[in-house]
Amino acid sequence: MSLAVELLRNLVKRRATVLYPFKDKDRVHLPEGLRGKIAFHRERCIGCSMCFRVCPSETIEMTEDRIGKRPRFYLDRCTYCQQCEDVCPTNSIELTNQFENFGFNRKEYRIE
Amino acid sequence: MSTTEIKVPVGPQHPALKEPENFTFTVEGETIVKADVRVGYAHKGIEKLMESKTYIQNIPLVERICGICNTAHTICYTQNIEYLYDKPIPRRAEYLRVVAEELNRIHSHLLWLGVVGHEVGFETLFMYVWRDREVVLDLIETLTGNRVSMAFTTVGGTRRDITPEIEHKMRKGMDILEERTKYYRRTVPADPTILARAKGVGILTAQEAIQLCAVGPFRRASTIKEDVRSDDSYAAHDDVPFNVVTYDTCDFFGRMMVRIDETLESINMVRYCLDHMPKGPIRMRLPNTPPVAEAVSKVEAPRGEDIHYVRSNGTDKPARYKVRAPTSANLAPLLQTMTSRGKYDVYIADIPVLIAGIDPCMCCMDRSVRFVDPSKGKTWVWTMDQLKKYSKRM
């Protein structure tokens, strides 16, 4: 049983799992380009509707205000594919590192 | 049917199955004399949905045909659309695709090895393998931004590039993975618990594998040296050297060893790609509307040969899309391995490992809807008009 050696070696190692919610030392490794919750910079948007056209899951709806067309994001439908960020000509859409997207109210998941 | 034969249904909900499918085994004592399968419990309607979305919107959708081999499906889809344009993509993008694909294969095979440990009743192996699999998942996350659903390839190339930091991390990760996989390569064939469960179980001879069109590691474990990556190379596979792993045991043990050895080959392929990565752009911009044409593309997914077909009609949406997932081809040979014939006896206790042996992904392959009336033993297919008529009558 060569796995027995491995078993004994692991007795003195620290645990491989991470407790959640995170305590002092427990953290998960978050890389730079993680695809998390969408952040929308409204002041940069020019209303070109490109994000609306590439979105696969109908997360984005175009609304009309006095300046022109602006997207509204329904994050509960988002698949985090990042295609909207890729096509945005003015970098007004950004996928942040925030991956904990849970809640009980759908209205919290609407970004304008 | 003689009086000693009993029919045992397994599924669609059963502890030994991870996905909904129904097997009916005709048993004589402990021996299985006949096996039958019924699938279609997880039909998702992806092909029809694809016809109503644009080519770019379809990329994340195709990724969701299969969660574990998602990269194989996206590479197959994107290169299929590129065939419609009939233009070669940048060489660097092709190398990046190979890196993503092989990382995906390492993750899939390690996941499968853990599942085998679980099915055999060796939970320790399951825990250790899945712990080591985290290394490759972290690498995938660093490269693509998500642990499993990569969204890495796009029509005309890839969406992200490998930076020197990511390359450094990847080389370190490959060293850890190689050491751990070599450890499993040594310990798994030496372990009496696994050997007792795996050796000589579920025989599929080379002749049967050819007759019944087995694909992937299942076929290669029956001594047949066939792999899409070497036989009909796509992306940068014509440059990247690797050995097609085969085993001559033709049993469950062979299937296990083929996958472990393929993991080692994949690690070497990732290293080769990092060493020989050409410089240049990673994406070529293509117009949104491909010309009217049809194309077929093949990719070696971790589970076997994955085939996609597309027909375009001059609009920005495909006119028809068809997916043949590898499990679909492996079902007929699976039934053969689960049937006692000649000198090979198959027992009820072998069922979980035999089903796990093909690395099944039933939800990927559920394609068509067929109506079944079990009381009359009747099956039929309805057209859309008939369905509408029926729904009005209800």
Image (cartoon, coloured by chain):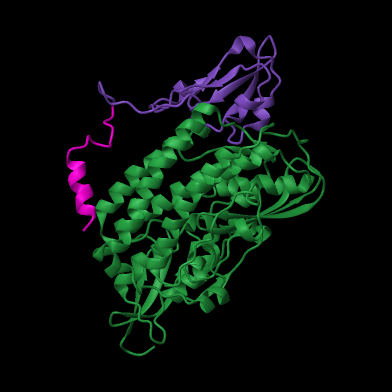
Left or right position of A47 against A98: right
Q: Name the residue at 54% across, 70% down.
A: B224
Left or right position of B6 against B63: left
Residue B243 point in image, percent of width and height: 53, 58
Residue A74 point in image, percent of width and height: 53, 26
Q: Which chain is green?
A: B
As displayed, is residue B80 above or below residue B220? above
Rendering quarter of residue B163: top right
In front of the other: B124 or B49: B124
Q: Which chain is purple?
A: A
In front of the other: B190 or B297: B190
Q: Quadrant of the C terminus of chain A?
A: top right
Is residue B306 visible to the viewer in this orientation of the structure? yes
> Is residue A84 found inside the magenta-colored segment of the image?
no
In front of the other: B85 or B22: B85
Q: Residue furthest bottom?
A: B2
Residue A84 point in image, percent of width and height: 61, 27
As displayed, is residue B96 above or below residue B35? above
> Is residue A5 found inside the magenta-colored segment of the image?
yes
Is residue B15 visible to the viewer in this orientation of the structure? no
Left or right position of B131 against B175: left
As displayed, is residue B157 above or below residue B187? above
Left or right position of B371 against B114: right
Residue B353 point in image, percent of width and height: 35, 65
Q: Which residues are magenta?
A: A1-21
In front of the other: A101 or B91: B91
Q: Quadrant of the N terminus of chain A?
A: bottom left
